[in-house]
Amino acid sequence: IIHGTDPQNEEYWGEVKDYDQKMVEMAALVTAVCLSPDKLWEPLTEGQKENLYQFLDQINKKEVHPNNWRYFRILVNMMFRLLGLPWSEECMEKDREVIENCYTGDGWYYDGNAGQVDYYIPFAMHYYGLIYAKMMEKTEPEYCSVLKKRSEEFSKDFVYWFSNDGNEI
Protein backbone atom coordinates (compact mmCIF):
# COMPACT_ATOMS: atom_id res chain seq x y z
CA ILE A 1 0.00 0.00 0.00
CA ILE A 2 2.80 2.40 0.91
CA HIS A 3 4.70 1.81 -2.33
CA GLY A 4 1.64 1.48 -4.55
CA THR A 5 0.25 4.86 -3.54
CA ASP A 6 3.56 6.76 -3.62
CA PRO A 7 3.95 8.49 -7.00
CA GLN A 8 7.71 8.67 -6.39
CA ASN A 9 8.04 4.91 -5.93
CA GLU A 10 8.79 2.57 -8.85
CA GLU A 11 5.93 0.32 -7.63
CA TYR A 12 3.37 3.15 -7.86
CA TRP A 13 0.07 1.85 -9.16
CA GLY A 14 -0.29 4.80 -11.52
CA GLU A 15 -2.82 7.48 -12.21
CA VAL A 16 -6.47 6.47 -12.30
CA LYS A 17 -8.27 7.04 -15.58
CA ASP A 18 -11.98 7.10 -16.40
CA TYR A 19 -13.53 3.62 -16.01
CA ASP A 20 -10.20 2.26 -14.71
CA GLN A 21 -9.87 -1.26 -13.30
CA LYS A 22 -8.00 0.33 -10.39
CA MET A 23 -11.39 1.56 -9.17
CA VAL A 24 -12.50 -2.05 -8.72
CA GLU A 25 -9.47 -2.82 -6.56
CA MET A 26 -10.15 0.23 -4.38
CA ALA A 27 -13.20 -1.47 -2.86
CA ALA A 28 -11.08 -4.23 -1.30
CA LEU A 29 -8.43 -1.78 -0.15
CA VAL A 30 -10.81 0.64 1.57
CA THR A 31 -12.77 -2.20 3.15
CA ALA A 32 -9.54 -3.57 4.62
CA VAL A 33 -8.55 -0.14 5.95
CA CYS A 34 -12.00 0.34 7.50
CA LEU A 35 -11.88 -3.09 9.14
CA SER A 36 -8.34 -2.67 10.46
CA PRO A 37 -7.42 1.00 10.73
CA ASP A 38 -5.10 0.15 13.61
CA LYS A 39 -2.98 -1.92 11.21
CA LEU A 40 -3.54 -0.25 7.84
CA TRP A 41 -4.05 3.46 8.61
CA GLU A 42 -2.78 4.51 12.01
CA PRO A 43 0.78 3.16 11.55
CA LEU A 44 1.26 5.19 8.35
CA THR A 45 3.23 8.42 8.47
CA GLU A 46 1.40 11.63 7.60
CA GLY A 47 3.01 11.55 4.14
CA GLN A 48 1.95 7.95 3.56
CA LYS A 49 -1.60 8.76 4.67
CA GLU A 50 -1.65 11.70 2.26
CA ASN A 51 -0.41 9.48 -0.60
CA LEU A 52 -3.10 6.89 0.12
CA TYR A 53 -5.75 9.59 0.35
CA GLN A 54 -4.63 11.25 -2.91
CA PHE A 55 -4.46 7.95 -4.75
CA LEU A 56 -7.98 6.95 -3.69
CA ASP A 57 -9.43 10.43 -4.15
CA GLN A 58 -8.70 10.18 -7.88
CA ILE A 59 -11.92 8.16 -8.18
CA ASN A 60 -13.89 11.29 -7.23
CA LYS A 61 -12.54 13.08 -10.29
CA LYS A 62 -13.12 10.32 -12.86
CA GLU A 63 -16.01 8.78 -14.76
CA VAL A 64 -17.36 5.58 -13.20
CA HIS A 65 -19.64 3.07 -14.94
CA PRO A 66 -23.33 3.56 -13.98
CA ASN A 67 -23.70 0.13 -12.37
CA ASN A 68 -22.24 -1.74 -9.37
CA TRP A 69 -19.00 0.20 -9.94
CA ARG A 70 -20.63 3.16 -8.23
CA TYR A 71 -20.18 1.23 -5.00
CA PHE A 72 -16.40 1.49 -5.41
CA ARG A 73 -16.61 5.27 -5.15
CA ILE A 74 -19.23 5.04 -2.42
CA LEU A 75 -16.88 2.86 -0.36
CA VAL A 76 -13.91 5.18 -0.94
CA ASN A 77 -15.94 8.13 0.33
CA MET A 78 -17.24 6.00 3.20
CA MET A 79 -13.66 5.35 4.29
CA PHE A 80 -12.85 9.03 4.04
CA ARG A 81 -15.87 9.87 6.21
CA LEU A 82 -15.02 7.22 8.79
CA LEU A 83 -11.44 8.50 9.05
CA GLY A 84 -12.54 12.15 9.24
CA LEU A 85 -11.01 13.04 5.88
CA PRO A 86 -12.49 15.29 3.20
CA TRP A 87 -14.97 13.32 1.10
CA SER A 88 -17.19 14.06 -1.88
CA GLU A 89 -20.77 14.43 -0.81
CA GLU A 90 -21.63 15.25 -4.42
CA CYS A 91 -20.21 11.95 -5.71
CA MET A 92 -21.87 10.07 -2.86
CA GLU A 93 -25.27 11.52 -3.75
CA LYS A 94 -24.88 10.84 -7.49
CA ASP A 95 -23.63 7.31 -6.91
CA ARG A 96 -26.38 6.42 -4.47
CA GLU A 97 -28.91 7.77 -6.96
CA VAL A 98 -27.51 5.43 -9.63
CA ILE A 99 -27.72 2.46 -7.23
CA GLU A 100 -31.24 3.43 -6.17
CA ASN A 101 -32.31 3.70 -9.82
CA CYS A 102 -31.09 0.12 -10.32
CA TYR A 103 -33.39 -1.12 -7.55
CA THR A 104 -36.49 -2.86 -8.90
CA GLY A 105 -38.14 -4.01 -5.68
CA ASP A 106 -38.36 -7.13 -3.51
CA GLY A 107 -34.61 -7.05 -2.91
CA TRP A 108 -33.75 -7.10 -6.61
CA TYR A 109 -31.49 -4.76 -8.55
CA TYR A 110 -30.33 -4.76 -12.11
CA ASP A 111 -26.69 -4.02 -12.81
CA GLY A 112 -26.68 -0.93 -14.96
CA ASN A 113 -28.81 -2.33 -17.78
CA ALA A 114 -32.49 -2.74 -17.05
CA GLY A 115 -33.34 -6.41 -17.11
CA GLN A 116 -29.74 -7.58 -16.59
CA VAL A 117 -30.00 -10.04 -13.70
CA ASP A 118 -26.86 -12.02 -12.92
CA TYR A 119 -24.33 -12.78 -10.22
CA TYR A 120 -23.48 -9.10 -9.88
CA ILE A 121 -26.74 -8.65 -7.98
CA PRO A 122 -25.68 -10.72 -4.94
CA PHE A 123 -21.90 -10.52 -5.40
CA ALA A 124 -21.75 -6.76 -5.96
CA MET A 125 -24.97 -4.85 -5.33
CA HIS A 126 -25.82 -6.63 -2.10
CA TYR A 127 -22.25 -7.45 -1.06
CA TYR A 128 -21.04 -3.84 -1.20
CA GLY A 129 -24.35 -2.58 0.15
CA LEU A 130 -23.96 -4.79 3.22
CA ILE A 131 -20.37 -3.64 3.74
CA TYR A 132 -21.63 -0.06 3.64
CA ALA A 133 -24.57 -0.89 5.91
CA LYS A 134 -22.35 -2.47 8.54
CA MET A 135 -19.72 0.26 8.53
CA MET A 136 -22.16 3.19 8.42
CA GLU A 137 -25.03 1.89 10.58
CA LYS A 138 -24.29 4.39 13.37
CA THR A 139 -23.95 7.31 10.95
CA GLU A 140 -26.91 6.51 8.66
CA PRO A 141 -29.10 4.01 10.51
CA GLU A 142 -32.21 4.48 8.35
CA TYR A 143 -30.49 3.99 5.00
CA CYS A 144 -28.40 1.11 6.31
CA SER A 145 -31.55 -0.57 7.56
CA VAL A 146 -33.02 -0.32 4.05
CA LEU A 147 -29.93 -1.97 2.54
CA LYS A 148 -30.05 -4.80 5.07
CA LYS A 149 -33.77 -5.34 4.50
CA ARG A 150 -33.28 -5.50 0.72
CA SER A 151 -30.57 -8.13 1.14
CA GLU A 152 -32.79 -10.14 3.42
CA GLU A 153 -35.60 -9.99 0.85
CA PHE A 154 -33.23 -10.99 -1.95
CA SER A 155 -31.92 -13.96 0.02
CA LYS A 156 -35.37 -15.55 -0.11
CA ASP A 157 -35.01 -15.82 -3.90
CA PHE A 158 -31.25 -16.24 -4.05
CA VAL A 159 -31.44 -19.55 -2.21
CA TYR A 160 -33.03 -21.00 -5.36
CA TRP A 161 -29.86 -20.26 -7.34
CA PHE A 162 -28.37 -23.33 -5.63
CA SER A 163 -29.23 -27.02 -5.65
CA ASN A 164 -29.58 -29.12 -2.51
CA ASP A 165 -25.93 -30.21 -2.82
CA GLY A 166 -24.75 -26.59 -3.03
CA ASN A 167 -24.04 -26.40 -6.75
CA GLU A 168 -25.03 -23.10 -8.28
CA ILE A 169 -26.78 -22.43 -11.54
Image (cartoon, rainbow, N blue to C red):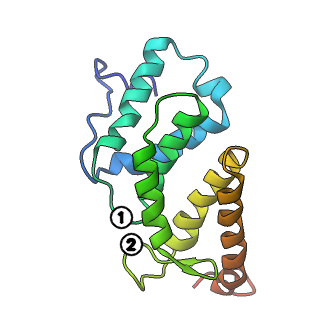
Badge 2 density bin: few <14, some 14–19, many ≥20, Cα 10 Å? some
Tags 1 and 2 in contact by the CB under 8 Å rule?
yes
Q: In which quarter of the image is the C terminus?
A: bottom right
Residue 23 picture location, percent across and down:
38, 48
Residue 22 screen position, x and y as percent:
35, 45
- Judge whether 59 appears above or below 94 on screen: above
Please say whether residue 26 is visible from this viewpoint. Answer: yes
* Along the line of sight, the residue nearer the viewer: 81 or 15: 81
- Inspect the image, locate mark 2, and give the three-letter code of the amino acid beneath it: Gly
- Circle on res. 112: 2
Q: Left or right of 136: which side holds 91?
A: left
Q: Residue at x 68, y 87 (%)?
A: 160
| Residue under the image location 64 percent in, 28 percent down | 37
**Is 68 located above or below residue 157 in the figure?**
above
Q: Name the residue under label 1.
A: 66
Q: Which corner quadrant of the image does residue 5 belong to?
A: top left
Q: What element carries label 1?
A: loop
> Residue 38: x and y, percent?
67, 24
Of the residues shown, which amino acid type is indicated by label 1?
Answer: Pro
Q: Which of marks 1 and 2 is nearer the N terminus?
A: 1
Q: Is residue 32 above or below residue 4?
A: below
Q: Nearer the viewer, residue 159 or 143?
A: 143
Residue 4 in sight: no
